[in-house]
Amino acid sequence: MRIVEQTLLEQMKFSDREIEKRKLLFDLRDEDVSILLGCRPAVVERLDWAINEFYARQIDDPEIALIIGDSETLSRLKGAMRNYILDLFSGVYDHAYVNSRLRVGKIHWRIGVTPKFFLSALRRLNVVLCSLMDEVTDSPIELHGRKEAIQKILFFDSQLVFDTYINALSTEVSAAQDETADYAKGLEEQIASRTSQLKELALTDELTGVNNKRAFSEHVKREMAAAHRAKRELSLLYIDINDFKLLNDTLGHQAGDDLLVKVARHLEKACRAGDMVCRLGGDEFCILMPDAPHSAAVGIAERFAELMYEEGSSPVGASVGIATTGPSTFCSAEELLKQSDQSMYKAKQRNKKNKPGLVCIDNPELEPDAPAPDDGASPTLVGETG
């Protein structure tokens, strides 16, 4: 059942047993109920006087007068007070009575009547009702019993009203806590998202969009450890663009930037899913290839060279070095990078006599000291794009 379909009594879980316990707590017994019911005729007869007297005392207090506000509100309050007093002397204090008192508390809470004002009003009502009993009761013993019964029912009412105050306050606190928790969760998600974005930016080369040197350092350590555990090979391609500084000096930095972006895209197309393309800085790139033997690395290098050739019109070429470690013995990540760099240098030395636009791959099938071919026939020199 939705909460809006429940009475206040149900929301606050007031059972028959709880109501009876509350009556006993204030010593509100059957004889008191009979006394209150017996007072009803006299109360009805003098009800208008009692209500007017009560509110005359109330509006004497400037703070309470400010809460009441205007004559129309005062008129409505007098009508509500009429019903309230009649219920006091009804002799029936069951679920409906308790629920009505809880409603009184909720209304007072909503209009901003604080506990001090409510207790003050209750005391004034007690004074007015006791004055009424003084006028209609001859026997001191009967008068004492009537005043005692009135006091008990007013105390019974007051604790119900304060239960509503406490419940309302607790609900507001819970709502505020939920709102705070939702805000904190949203803020946490924003921070996590922003942190992820910042981390991605920190690990991404701004110009080409591939991994940067910092990302490479993280990836190579992780992949090296994984290769060692799985006893699998790990290869690294090291790519350096030939005569890049000369290109910048002659054609301008924009032409250099365009070439870097093109190289990065070709490297991404050439590699496999799971391979990591990184820009190490300047005109140097690498591809980290988990579970890739040397032959697979050569194939990826050749695919990159083919892509560069297919596009054509490249003013400069590139040199590609290859290093592989595993599966039985492994070098360090630093040594793997050093080996691939040295391999790239060999390719660059062989490529010096060739035309621009050639991609030279350091292939172990070449003798280390063999002269670089002067045509594009060797499998280590791919494409004449100049």
Image: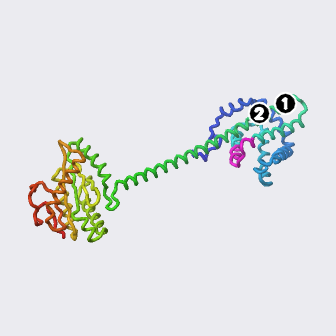
Classify residue 27 as left or right of residue 381: right
Rounded to the nearest whole Å, what is the CA distance between mark 1 and mark 2?
Answer: 12 Å
Placement of 71 over or under 94, stated as above or below: below
Say what secondary structure mark 2 lies in: helix
**In the foreground, 198 or 339:** 339
Determine which residue is flagged by label 1: 144
| The N terminus sits in image quarter | top right
Determine which residue is flagged by label 2: 152
**In the foreground, 109 or 256:** 256
Say what secondary structure mark 1 lies in: helix
Residue 58, percent from left and from top: 81, 46
**In the foreground, 119 or 83:** 119
Classify residue 324 as left or right of residue 59: left
- In the image, what residue occupies the spot 86% across and 36% down? 133
Q: Please provide the residue range marked out in magenta.
A: 103-118
Residue 8, percent from left and from top: 65, 42
Going by the numbered disc 2, the residue's amino acid type is Lys
- Which quadrant of the figure has residue 109? top right
Q: Mark 1 or mark 2, which has the lower sequence index?
A: 1
Classify residue 175 as left or right of residue 146: left
Type of secondary structure dominating the magenta stretch: helix
